[in-house]
Amino acid sequence: MSGNARSRSRWGAWFFLLLAVGLLVLATVSAVAAYEFWYDGRVYEGVRVAGIPLGGLSFDQAIEVIRDGLTPYPGAPVIVRYGDRTWSLPSADLGIAVDARVTAGQAFNIGRHGSLGFERSLAVMWQGLRDDLMAQWLALSEGITVTPTLHFDENRLAFSLKRIAQEVDLPPREGSLSVSGLEVTGTPGQAGRLVNLDQTRAAVVPLLQAGQGGVVDLAVEERLPAVMSVDNATARASALLHTSLNLVVAGLDGPQRYAVDPATLRQWLSFLPTPDSDGTMELVVELNPEPITTFVQQIARQLDRPAYDARLDFNVETNQVVVLQPSQPGQQLDVAASAASIEAAIMDGAGQPQASAAAEPPAASKTVTLSLAVLQPKVDSNKVAEMGIVEQISEGTTYFAGSTRERVQNIVTAADKLRGAVVPPGEEFSFYHFVGDVTAANGFVDSLIIRGDRTEVGVGGGVCQVSTTVFRAAFWAGFPILERYPHGYVVGWYGEPGLDASIFTPDADFRFRNDTAHFLVIQPEVDTAKGRLTFHFYGTGPDRTVEMEKPVISNVRDAPKPLYQEDITLPAGVIKQVDWAKQGMDVVVNRIIKYADGKVKRDKFVSKYRPWQAVYLYGPGTQLPPGASEP
């Protein structure tokens, strides 16, 4: 064969080969194009979800097939385990279901990850196309199974785990003590447990999402009580309750004894958790001071009694002091110191014992002497000679002639309550302290009194005659006047206005201070026949003289017109006067005290009296005087 013929033969072979290859490529491309065309908008063949074939289905069809085939979801339950106990969490109970749309989307996207976007390079485009074709081929030749995307009800899961926790949780038991009689029982603490719901959920959720079931160990944490050991506290409490406590008080009437029984002692004990040196808590037995103080206060109410001052008189004929009523010392329990002594005695030697609580401790007896103070009277009848009561230093006198029998009785009663009164040097005299409440229970009777803007019948009318007279004696003695109130209007019994002192117990008192260095004896003298009341002050006369300037009267106002009031208890035609008209005025009394060293002191006493109208009562139908005014 010629060379040309052989050359033509080789080219022909290559032509046919290339043609065959080209046809094969064309056929392949056509087949691929046809395959892509056919599965455009469809799931590629060989793609499955949980064994359900989805090849050739549209996206919506795949959703329906997945929903129909996997509802309810046939997943295996998750088993929760704690020790030898297990709990099953079935899919149905937790609301586990397939998210058909998301799962269908995952199946549909297999073989469709490539992109022809212009923003991507040719190499990237080719890589994506190649990956898609490989995925399509793998699905077609071997099949690809898509794991379904699951969702579950969080509330149901939380409820199920909490239900399990309720069966497992065990609160810790605190160590404690109980007391019955003298027997002390200690209960040691016990550890508890608590399910960690968050940690357990974190382990369960991945299994639920995978739909594969499995076993999860319940996350349980130990919970220790604040107090575990109570052995020391038990032994200590038992030792304290076997202590016999005897209290002794050395009083004025001899020693008094009181016993503290175990029942009372038990009320004094407190069991408190206290941090130990290693950071743990230990039950500690302590004394509660409040009930101890209350117990001592009860004893104090039985023992305490005030000191009573002596009542003295002065015999002007012999210049001797007469003891009318001897003084008496008093006593007072020091509650705070006594309670502290009791606590110290109980705790002495009662440290934290190490003995076994089961062993009954021997009984111990302790004696505690309580702190009692003797109260000495301020006016001691045993020290009369030291009091300096040697002479009269002043007196004051008022007159009550014409007073009613009831008024005289009140004057006598109030004066008698001041008989023998003694004011120590530097101390205050209080009218209320000696006379007390002006009540019927205190010996006073009804008489006319000033109440508000009226004179009316009330208990104690006439007592102000006594306070006024005492005021005058204190005035002329030069004593500092600490509290004094004038009457509401000028009272005729007291003579010249400006030197009266009204009292209204217990709110309005009359007080002065004995500023001398000696005791002061107050001696009343009541002459009911002459209607005269005098108060004598005995002591040691201070080195001073007292003078009074003439009272300064100003702002004089006439009394209002008489007032007539009907009284149904009076017969017709009877008119009875019950109040008398008085002018209103302001009165200033100046007292001048001159001392031997030349010092002069001036005191001003101001009294403001209101105008006071006459008041008449009349029986019904009585003809009143012309111009008479009624309320």
Image (tube, rainbow, N blue to C red):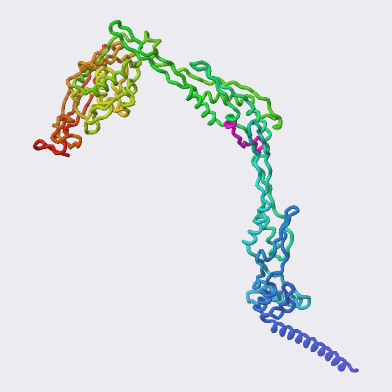
116 w.r.t. 209: above or below: below
Q: Nearer the viewer, residue 133 or 261?
A: 261
Residue 415, image x, y percentages:
28, 19
Is the C terminus in the top left, top right, bottom left or bottom right quadrant?
top left
442 w.r.t. 192: above or below: above
Q: Residue furthest top?
A: 318
Query: Is residue 44 visible to the viewer in this orientation of the structure?
Result: yes
Where on the picture, by quarter, is residue 322? top left
Residue 607, image x, y percentages:
21, 27
Q: Residue furthest left?
A: 626
Q: Is 319 left or right of 300, judged from the image as shown?
A: left
377 w.r.t. 344: above or below: above
Q: Which residues are magenta?
A: 266-283
Q: Residue furthest front?
A: 571
Residue 587, image x, y percentages:
19, 26
Q: Nearer the viewer, residue 217 or 18?
A: 217
Q: Nearer the viewer, residue 206 or 16?
A: 206
Q: Residue furthest right?
A: 1
Q: Is 564 left or right of 80, judged from the image as shown?
A: left
Q: Is 147 left or right of 387, judged from the image as shown?
A: right
Q: Is 378 left or right of 208, judged from the image as shown?
A: left
**Residue, x 20% and y 16% (percent of image)?**
530
Where on the picture, by quarter, is residue 207? bottom right
Number of disc labels: 0
**Is 408 in the magenta?**
no
**Residue, x 89% and y 94% (percent of image)?**
2
Is the N terminus in the top left, top right, bottom left or bottom right quadrant?
bottom right
